[in-house]
Image: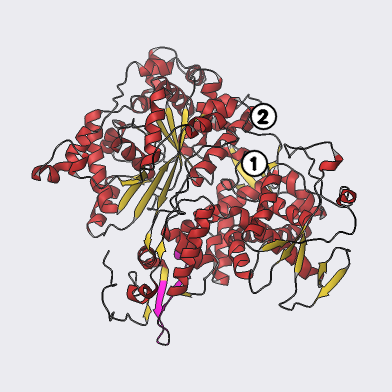
């Protein structure tokens, strides 16, 4: 990308820039104080590839025992003659062809796979449930699934498709970088014999092609990829099925449509079993919002429980884009030609960072009992007593998300006990969390989060540079890897170039810096919010704690008077001066954080950690980041007289794995002091704004309950909620991140779990209607007040 840093007198841009490709600020103005963004602390780079120390300690211990030098990163798209066995002028022009030809490929021929699939008990039961006889009749009814069952990996075709993919991605992305240290560890573990299962969080159709390309380039076994996109072109389907792509049936547009066929799930389960028996690798993508795709992980876990498959090694994959490509659910010849034509006018500048985590044993995770599933309760049992009765006693437990694995997704779990089903759901949640945690934070994510959560009304370029440097350090301290490095002005310049369609860059004559602000449009806000999600995930503990502080301050404002409670318990009125101090009790603050934890969507909290422990860590994190300081209480009597305190919050609950019957181990209730307003409000507001979009969606959805007068089909109900969210955002002309389709679907699912919306089966369809309890305007108002207390507007 061309820079203007060498020109002494840069040409000034127009005063206000509204086009799709704005003229960016001159780098020479920021080069006066040259700063570097270092992607590591000292010489140590954050290790984001380790498995869970609680659920898989044996796999972690084996990983820690392996010695490997930091090898750095490699751009998969950058292929030179050094990557081949040959040298010379002609080799430099054919190096990509020679490189792909030299890649090691593991062929996967189909050998009697159809007969073995037909012998599966689940397939037999599904066939017997339909009309027809045995033998040839069964094979005839499986004719629609023959291309799926006969999916294989052809070495010659795989190399050709790999070469085409390298060329296409070379025009689409600036680089696709992978950590070589992670690849070296994966090569060692792949030789132990257990099949590898790659799990990633779905973002785009590009995910299905990036993982096989990276593995092929490093001489690893290319996996069979479960592709959730419908391919309309017959010749393209034939090619993809010869390189290991497990496609949807031609009669189904989406996964949900495919699962309506009684044969699809049994055939897929039997096919996965046969592939694992053959020692093949499998790549599975899971949707963060709906959990779609997680049913195949439940099938694999069930195969291990039945001892049909000895064990598998799970590898979570974090894929980070500078700009996430648009996801299309249907791909045909027209889509391919349109995409190729757009590459002609496209300058590659977007980068991709891929992290392959170190494998861990799925058998160890699920069968040793270390993955905790105890204390799971319905959301209405956790929060309804607090919402309706204004109860201050929280119910300890974790929110049950049974919708991540509905009964029709896994036929073998229909008659299973609830703990077994909960274990599959915990597995899905855990892998979603791990896949998100190992993602690198790109520069566009940093800039988007700062513009949305801190500088929504605009910011000078120099101030934004300083904030990018500060936020990078904060992320590295939290063991999050970043996908960029170099001079600060170059990092910011590239980020603004990629985010240009969603920004307004203006030049003010009285100032030397440019003013940058996000566009106030739904498309721009939605795109910036998608980029900023990974930053919110990194600061989730601090964000939960900050919203809990906001809720307590909201209660103080509703009370009319703020008070500072000292050691003697007497209150001192505060008139709102800037030098006043606000003291918050640990018990009340932890209660607020605990209640907010239950409203978080999946993927933010590790399932192996209790909600109470997460809430305590959220409060402690505010002390570490400087928002709160511990209140020192002077004592006139010995400490031993304070072991039993009235009103202290007791942590001896079933949710705490370290409970004790000893009275001396009751923790003392502390208090925290909110720092001076001149020091902490910007940080507090930044953290609160990270969760404001999700909470505001719930508030608006609660306000729109009065519009749902009669039960509606689930799709229509979600569409009506989405329409209400869009109308509310358009009236306010802001907060468009709270009115997306994903936000409406997440809010509807939360209201269902909370008991606000009730599911009813009518004529084979799921209808949603407002429950009898929340048809009362008073209860709807209580729900709105409970959620809005966490908003810091």
Picture residue at 25% right of the left edge, 36% below the top: 235
Q: Which residues are magenta?
A: 504-524
Percent across and percent down for residue 199 are: 46, 37
Q: Is residue 404 visible?
A: yes
Picture residue at 44% right of the left edge, 53% below the top: 40
Q: In the shown orientation, is residue 197 left or right of residue 368?
A: left
As drawn, the label of residue 150 is none
Q: Is residue 169 above or below residue 789?
A: above
Percent across and percent down for residue 389 are: 82, 53
Q: Secondary structure at mark 1?
A: loop
Considering depth in this image, is 665 or 215 the residue closer to the camera?
A: 665
As drawn, the label of residue 609 is 1
Percent across and percent down for residue 338 are: 27, 53
Which residue carries the number 2 mark? 418
Dividing the picture into quarters, in which one does residue 551 lie? bottom right
Q: Is residue 707 visible?
A: no
Circle 2 residues within 10 Å: few <14, some 14–19, many ≥20: few
């Amino acid at each position: 990308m061309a820079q203007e840093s060498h020109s002494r007198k840069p040409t000034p841009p127009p005063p206000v820039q509204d086009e799709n490709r704005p003229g960016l600020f001159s780098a020479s103005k920021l080069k006066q104080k040259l700063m570097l963004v270092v992607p590591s602390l000292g010489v140590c780079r954050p290790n984001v590839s380790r498995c869970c120390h609680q659920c898989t300690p044996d796999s972690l211990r084996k990983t820690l025992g392996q010695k490997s030098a930091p090898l750095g990163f490699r751009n998969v798209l950058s292929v030179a003659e050094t990557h081949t066995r040959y040298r010379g002028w002609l080799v430099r022009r054919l190096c990509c062809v020679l490189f792909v030809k030299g890649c090691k490929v593991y062929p996967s021929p189909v050998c009697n796979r159809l007969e073995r699939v037909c012998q599966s008990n689940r397939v037999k039961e599904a066939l017997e449930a339909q009309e027809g006889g045995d033998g040839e009749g069964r094979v005839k009814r499986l004719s629609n699934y023959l291309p799926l069952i006969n999916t294989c990996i052809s070495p010659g075709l795989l190399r050709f498709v790999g070469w085409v993919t390298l060329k296409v991605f070379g025009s689409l992305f600036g680089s696709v970088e992978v950590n070589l240290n992670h690849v070296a560890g994966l090569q060692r573990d792949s030789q132990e014999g257990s099949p590898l299962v790659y799990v990633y969080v779905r973002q785009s159709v590009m995910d299905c092609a990036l993982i096989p390309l990276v593995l092929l380039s490093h001489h690893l076994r290319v996996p069979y990829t479960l592709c959730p996109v419908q391919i309309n072109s017959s010749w393209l389907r034939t090619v993809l099925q010869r390189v290991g792509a497990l496609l949807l049936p031609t009669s189904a547009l989406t996964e949900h449509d495919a699962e309506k066929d009684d044969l699809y799930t049994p055939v897929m389960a039997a096919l996965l079993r046969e592939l694992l028996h053959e020692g093949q690798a499998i790549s599975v993508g899971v949707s963060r919002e709906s959990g779609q795709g997680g049913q195949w992980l439940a099938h694999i876990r069930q195969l291990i429980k039945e001892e049909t498959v000895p064990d598998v090694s799970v590898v979570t994959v974090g894929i980070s884009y500078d700009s996430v490509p648009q996801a299309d659910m249907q791909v045909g010849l027209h889509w391919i030609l349109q995409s190729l034509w757009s590459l002609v006018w496209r300058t590659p500048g977007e980068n991709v960072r891929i992290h392959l985590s170190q494998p861990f044993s799925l058998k160890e995770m699920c069968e040793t009992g270390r993955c905790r599933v105890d204390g799971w309760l319905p959301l209405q049992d956790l929060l309804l007593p607090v919402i309706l009765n204004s109860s201050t006693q929280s119910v300890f437990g974790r929110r049950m998300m049974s919708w991540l694995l509905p009964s029709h997704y896994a036929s073998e779990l229909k008659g299973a006990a609830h703990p077994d089903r909960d274990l599959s759901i915990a597995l899905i949640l855990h892998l979603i969390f791990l896949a998100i945690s190992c993602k690198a934070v790109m520069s566009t994510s940093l800039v988007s989060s700062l513009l949305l959560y801190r500088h929504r009304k605009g910011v000078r370029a120099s101030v934004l540079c300083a904030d990018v440097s500060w936020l990078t350090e904060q992320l590295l301290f939290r063991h999050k890897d970043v996908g960029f490095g170099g001079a600060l002005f170059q990092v910011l310049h590239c980020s603004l170039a990629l985010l240009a369609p969603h920004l307004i860059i203006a030049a003010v004559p009285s100032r030397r810096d440019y003013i940058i602000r996000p566009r106030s449009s739904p498309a721009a806000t939605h795109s910036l919010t998608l980029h900023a999600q990974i930053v919110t995930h990194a600061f989730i503990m601090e964000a939960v704690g900050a919203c809990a502080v906001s809720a307590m301050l909201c209660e103080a404002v509703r009370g009319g008077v703020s008070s500072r409670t000292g050691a003697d318990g007497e209150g001192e009125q505060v008139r709102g001066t800037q030098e006043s101090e606000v003291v918050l009790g640990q018990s009340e603050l932890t209660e607020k954080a605990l209640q907010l934890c239950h409203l978080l969507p999946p993927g933010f909290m590790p399932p192996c950690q209790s909600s109470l422990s997460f809430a305590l860590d959220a409060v402690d994190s505010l002390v570490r980041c400087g928002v709160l300081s511990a209140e020192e209480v002077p004592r006139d009597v010995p400490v031993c007289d304070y072991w039993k305190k009235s009103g202290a919050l007791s942590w001896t609950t079933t949710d705490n794995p370290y409970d004790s019957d000893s009275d001396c181990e009751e923790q003392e209730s502390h208090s925290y002091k909110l720092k001076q307003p001149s020091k902490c409000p910007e940080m507090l507001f930044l953290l609160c704004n990270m969760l404001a979009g999700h909470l505001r969606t719930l508030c608006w959805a609660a306000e729109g309950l009065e519009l749902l007068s009669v039960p509606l089909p689930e799709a229509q109900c979600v569409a009506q909620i989405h329409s209400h969210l869009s109308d509310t955002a358009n009236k306010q002309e802001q907060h468009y991140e709270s009115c997306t389709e994903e936000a409406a679907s997440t809010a509807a699912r939360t209201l269902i779990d909370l008991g606000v919306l009730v599911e009813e089966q009518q004529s084979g369809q799921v209808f949603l209607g407002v429950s009898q309890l929340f048809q009362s305007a008073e209860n709807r108002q209580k729900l709105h007040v409970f959620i809005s207390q966490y908003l810091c507007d």
